[in-house]
């Protein structure tokens, strides 16, 4: 079974310099808000990614699966 995750580019504030920037990679909302509680989605940057429901299927090699 597969499920879909929603990923976005986010506008966040650097905690040291206090400068705003757009993330290089798309993040889900939980990860973006962990990075910056005031993170804002960049309009038009949404990506819907279909991922397997089986966590072992996410491994990139048989070695990682044990």
Image: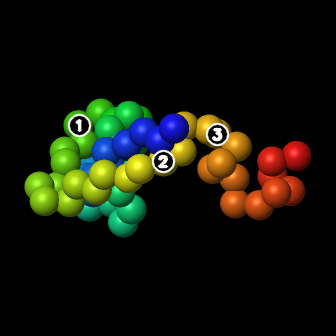
Secondary structure under tag 1 reads loop
Q: Which colour scheme is used?
A: rainbow
Residue 38: horizontal and vertical position, in percent? 23, 37
Q: What numbered label is drawn on residue 16?
A: none
Secondary structure under tag 3 reads helix
Residue with the mark numbered 1: 38
Describe residue 50's horizontal placement relative to residue 17 as left or right.
right
Residue with the mark numbered 3: 55
Of tags 1 and 3, which is closer to the observer?
3
Identify the mark nearer the N-term, 2 or 1. Answer: 1
| Residue at far left of view | 43
Residue with the mark numbered 2: 51
Disc 1 crowd rating (10 Å Cα; few below 14, some 14-19, many 20+) is: few
Disc 3 crowd rating (10 Å Cα; few below 14, some 14-19, many 20+) is: few
Seen from the viewer's position, the closer of residues 57 and 25 is 57
Secondary structure under tag 2 reads strand
Of tags 2 and 1, which is closer to the observer?
2
Q: Distance between the residues labelled 2 and 1?
A: 27 Å
Q: How far apart are marks 1 and 3 (CA)?
A: 30 Å
Residue 15: horizontal and vertical position, in percent? 37, 47
Res 32 visible: no
Determine the image quadrant of residue 26. Answer: bottom left
| Residue at far front of view | 1
Q: How far apart are marks 3 and 2 (CA)?
A: 9 Å
Contact flag, marks 1 and 3 (Cβ < 8 Å): no
Seen from the viewer's position, the closer of residues 16 and 64 is 64
Res 3 visible: yes
Q: Which residue is drawn at 17% across and 55% down?
A: 42
Q: Residue at x 47, y 41 (%)?
A: 2
Q: Which residue is drawn at 30% across and 52% down?
A: 48
């Amino acid at each position: 079974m597969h499920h879909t995750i929603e990923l976005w580019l986010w506008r966040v504030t650097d905690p040291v310099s206090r400068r705003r920037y757009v993330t290089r990679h798309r993040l889900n909302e939980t990860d973006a808000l962990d990075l910056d509680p005031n993170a804002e989605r960049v309009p038009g940057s949404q990506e819907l990614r279909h991922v397997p429901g089986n966590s072992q299927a996410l491994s990139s090699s048989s070695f990682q699966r044990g």
